Image (spheres, helix red, strand yellow):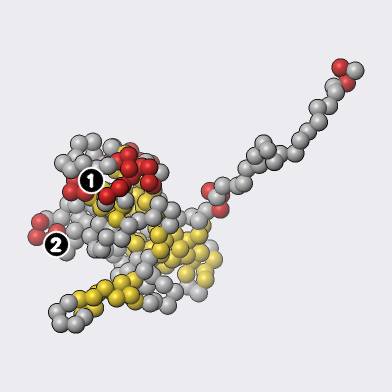
């Protein structure tokens, strides 16, 4: 292929917004104790 | 904009149109020169220049550019175009094999698609050459003369294979503003 006259030279880094963040799995999520509601007392 | 010794640092990749050859098992390969298989995630360009070898043979020899491929002074790197290729007259085809009718994508084992580039990218008026590249979408017309194993490609690359060229353009066309080049006339 021919790209024509070179007009720019760049260093492109992948967009960090499309890097997936680690997702906390249910197994590792902190356990929560059920709290009695005031109405139930 | 940040400049790193004359090279702009930008966030995000660049898209462009290019051809691949479909190999056995759904592998995408370099279409015209060599038969390198494309990795689905990341491909690193290397420079292999043609040099006269012993007798009349020409040898593919590795060329080490300072900073790697693509080098402005060379022809190396992964290539793609800002616009869809157009059909060239037969007499010119030998020198510009990529100038094929996009609507023939899928025939003769060649498929047109969109590639994404990052790393060092040399942006030209008609296309780019890049250090890193991967396929992101393909167009294969509905009825092709030779069978294209689309399920094998999809399975290997996890990319969409569209049967509507305008859909490919509408969804995946290169962003000329991001490329920093004038809009097509």
> Which of B177 and B11 lies nearest the eye of the viewer?
B11
Residue at horizontal 50%, vertical 74%?
A: B5
Residue at horizontal 14%, vertical 59%?
A: B93
> Which of A31 and B133 lies nearest the eye of the viewer?
A31
Residue at horizontal 19%, vertical 82%?
A: B54
Q: Which residue is mark 1?
A: B105
Q: Chain of mark 2?
A: B
> Which of B6 and A23 lies nearest the eye of the viewer?
A23
Task: Decide: few, some or many residues near mark 1? Use Cα within 10 Å; few <14, some 14-19, many ≥20.
Answer: many
> Which of B57 and B162 lies nearest the eye of the viewer?
B57
Q: What is the distance, in whole Å, between disc 2 and disc 1 at their CAs?
A: 18 Å
**Residue A37 spot, x, y in % from top left:** 85, 22
Res. B34 image quadrant: bottom left
| Residue B94 badge | 2
Disc 1 secondary structure class = loop
* Residue farthest left in this picture: B91
Q: Chain of mark 1?
A: B
**Residue B170 spot, x, y in % from top left:** 35, 41
| Residue B15 badge | none
Q: Is residue B160 left or right of residue B6?
A: left
The answer to whether residue A18 is seen in the rendering is yes
**Residue B38 spot, x, y in % from top left:** 35, 56
């Amino acid at each position: 292929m021919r790209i024509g006259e070179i007009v720019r030279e760049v260093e492109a880094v992948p967009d960090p917004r499309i890097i997936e963040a680690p997702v906390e799995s249910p197994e590792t999520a902190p356990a929560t104790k059920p709290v009695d509601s005031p109405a139930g007392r | 904009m940040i400049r790193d010794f004359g090279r702009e640092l930008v966030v995000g990749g660049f898209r462009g149109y290019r051809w691949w050859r479909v190999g056995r098992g759904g592998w995408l390969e370099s279409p015209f020169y060599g038969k390198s298989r494309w990795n689905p995630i990341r491909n690193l360009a290397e420079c292999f220049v043609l040099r006269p070898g012993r007798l009349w043979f020409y040898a593919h020899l590795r060329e080490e550019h300072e900073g790697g491929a693509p080098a402005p002074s060379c022809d190396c790197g992964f290539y793609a175009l800002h616009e869809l290729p157009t059909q060239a007259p037969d007499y010119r085809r030998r020198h510009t094999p990529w100038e094929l009718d996009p609507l023939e994508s899928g025939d003769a084992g060649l498929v047109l698609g969109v590639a994404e580039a990052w790393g060092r990218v040399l942006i030209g008026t008609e296309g780019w050459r890049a250090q890193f590249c991967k396929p992101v979408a393909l167009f294969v017309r509905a009825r092709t003369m030779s069978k294209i194993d689309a399920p094998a490609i999809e399975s290997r690359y996890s990319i969409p294979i569209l049967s509507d060229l305008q859909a490919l353009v509408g969804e995946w066309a290169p962003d000329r503003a991001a490329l920093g080049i004038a809009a097509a006339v």
